[in-house]
Image: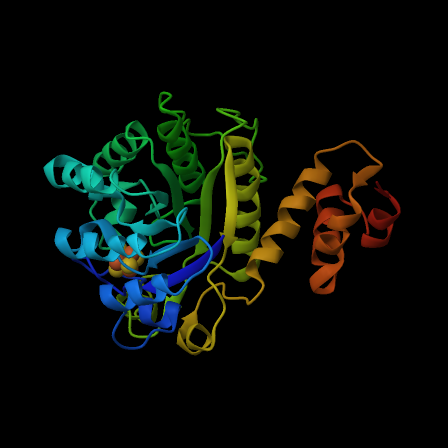
Amino acid sequence: MKRLAFFIPFQGCGRRCVYCDQRAITGVSSGMATPEEVRSIAGRQVLPVEICFFGGSFAKIEPGLMERYIEALTLAPEGSRVTFSSYPGDFEGERGALAIETLKKYPIGTIELGIPSLDPAVLRQCNRDDDPEKIKNSIEALRSAGFHIGAQTMIGLPGQTFESAVRDLETIASLMTGTSDASSPGRVNSCALPVKPLALNPNATWDLRIYPCLVLRGTELESLYRSGKYAPLALEEAIRQAGTLLRVASSLGFSAIRVGLLESDSLRRSVVAGPHHPAFGELALSEKLALELAAQDIPWKIGSGKISQLTGHGGRGLRRLAELAGIAPEAARKLLTVR
Ligand code: SF4
């Protein structure tokens, strides 16, 4: 289904997360589409569309305005739906219940919740609401109401450890399935490989986005970075974390729809420091594949469609596989069997 993306930079946010500059990320430097403009564009479509609102906290904008945006659906072709991102605590309490009642009247595609962390100390350092219970209550409320939920999570945040990022993902998965909290400290060993993949619901698919924390110009994180109070992940470390997280995520029933921010001129211009790479997602996939192969018996069997994940970007995946196996890249290449 064709996607019509509308950016609502910082609308409904209330506070500014230390790492966030939606204008740099989205490239939308001023203004945003009005509900009338969204309706007009939706009304010109001939096939069903997914009308997407990103870059803010959609469920927290003034309720009447939120509904006026959603009502663009009434002019769009039948079968169209609305997808949006929102602050994860937006759906708890009285106001959250009201938002859910409003949303239930319309075809909603995915509600993407920004859940960079569930660790109160990390949330506090990021200038976010530091009560993970609100996030859990929101997920529970959305799940009970039957909405399809997606999660946007992060690595390399101030105060965040990789182990806590893995635990968060496990907890989010358990909340989405409605099972008890599956978090278990110590699940990750020193090689950053999951000791035993979880399989809470192998048939479930929740959309997942993983973003490495970048230092963007003009953010509070830039001040923390320049004063030595924050050190971003190195690129290789971020790739390893993202690849491992991808592996854990697929065992938990997540479908990773994006790893790394969408590359753009405005993003490139804004990055001061951090693990920025235009093909970050591909590099993370190369790490995931190397980890998967290294866990198998030799010869390593690989689908022909995945060879480029090992050989692309200067053979990064193959070198990593060789490193994991403790052999030379040429020797690793000879142990591959293409299916
Ligand atoms: S990260 Fe999300 S909630 Fe935080 S300021 Fe940016 S858009 Fe708003």
Give the camera-side residue of 114 and 107.
107
* Position of the C terminus by quadrant: top right
- Using the rendered image of the protein, determine whether residue 17 is visible from the camera's viewpoint: no
Q: Is residue 195 above or below residue 35?
A: above
Residue 316 placement, left or right of 62: right
Which residue, as the protein is rendered here, is positioned at the far top? 180
Residue 12: x and y, percent? Answer: 19, 57
Which residue, as the protein is rendered here, is positioned at the far right? 334
Residue 245: x and y, percent? Answer: 52, 42
Q: Which quadrant of the figure has residue 217?
A: bottom left
Q: Which quadrant of the figure has residue 324?
A: top right
Q: Is residue 281 above or below residue 177?
A: below
Q: Is residue 129 above or below residue 193?
A: below
Please state the quadrant of the image where ligand 1 appears.
bottom left
Residue 337 placement, left or right of 137: right
* Residue drawn at the location 24% of the way across and 40% of the way down: 105
Residue 306 placement, left or right of 14: right
User: Colour scheme of this structure image?
Assistant: rainbow
Residue 32 placement, left or right of 79: left
Q: Is residue 183 above or below residue 71?
A: above
Residue 216: x and y, percent? Answer: 36, 70
Give the camera-side residue of 233 and 181.
181
The number of discs equals 0
Which residue, as the protein is rendered here, is positioned at the far left? 94
Residue 266: x and y, percent? Answer: 42, 76
* Residue drawn at the location 46% of the way across and 75% of the way down: 268
- Using the rendered image of the protein, determine whether residue 111 is visible from the camera's viewpoint: yes
* Residue drawn at the location 13% of the way across and 35% of the way down: 93
